[in-house]
Image (tube, grey):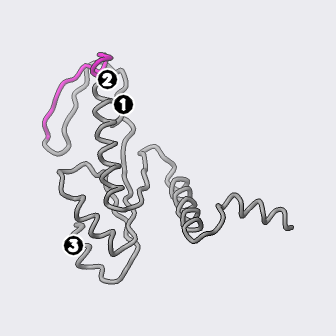
Amino acid sequence: LLIAGQRIVKRRSTVFVISDFISPPGWEQALAELSRRHDVTAVRLFDPLEMELPDLGLVTMRDAETGEQLLVDTHDAGFRARFAAAARAREDALLSSLAQAGVDTLELATDDDLLDAILRFADLRRQRARLASGGAPAHLVRNEARRAS
């Protein structure tokens, strides 16, 4: 889809790539190429349970890609710690790949308030643009405006 996006969108555009970014390697290069021509934001969707398992006892887990099922004991603290460490490593690698591709990232958890997350992201981008153009940070601009009135 990323490669198709490069062919379809000819003029410089704002592009949102919405995904969980859990896929085989190879998307990184296509995303980097897309970001060289366009203003790309990666909207990463995730479930907080992907990062840390609750203590629920025996649970059957299924791989969404392969359909493989595995019975795991989430009561085992060692298993939960290994799961969390592996999740952190995946998270670090993913964020590194997105940064190397040169894209902004908006992370949305399944339990996030969508509107609030989008507004915070837009505010951060505005502040970054203001700083990049030599302007003062937004909180200083607001304080100066208050003093002037």
Q: CA distance from mark 2 to mark 1?
A: 7 Å
Q: Which residues are magenta?
A: 67-80
The one of 145 and 72 positioned closer to us in this rendering: 145
Asked if marks 2 and 1 touch (Cβ < 8 Å), the reply is yes
Q: Quadrant of the C terminus?
A: bottom right
Viewer-proximal residue among 56 and 119: 119
Instruction: Tell me if residue 73 is in the magenta stretch.
Output: yes
Specify whether 26 is left or right of 48.
left
Q: Earlier in the sequence, mark 2 or mark 1?
A: 1
Residue 146, position as x, y percentages in the image: 81, 62
The residue sitting at 19% across, 24% down in the picture is: 71
- Identify the residue at the far front of this view: 134
Q: Position of residue 83 (x, y in %)?
A: 28, 28
| Residue that appears at 28% across and 64% down | 31
Q: At label 1, which amino acid type do we have?
A: Glu
Label 3: which secondary element: helix
Instruction: State the SS at label 1.
Output: loop
Q: Which mark is drawn over residue 52?
A: 1
Q: How far is mark 2 from mark 3, CA to CA?
A: 40 Å
Element marked by disc 2? helix
The reply to whether discs 3 and 1 touch (Cβ–Cβ < 8 Å) is no
Q: Is residue 2 above or below residue 21?
A: below
Please indicate whether residue 19 sits to the left or right of residue 119 in the image.
left
Q: CA distance from mark 3 to mark 1?
A: 35 Å
Magenta stretch holds residue 145: no
Q: Residues within 10 Å of mark 3 (few under 14, many from 20)?
A: few
Q: Mark 3 or mark 1, which has the lower sequence index?
A: 3
> Which residue is denoted by mark 3 in the rendering?
4
Q: Which residue is mark 2?
A: 80
| Quadrant in which the N terminus is drawn | bottom left
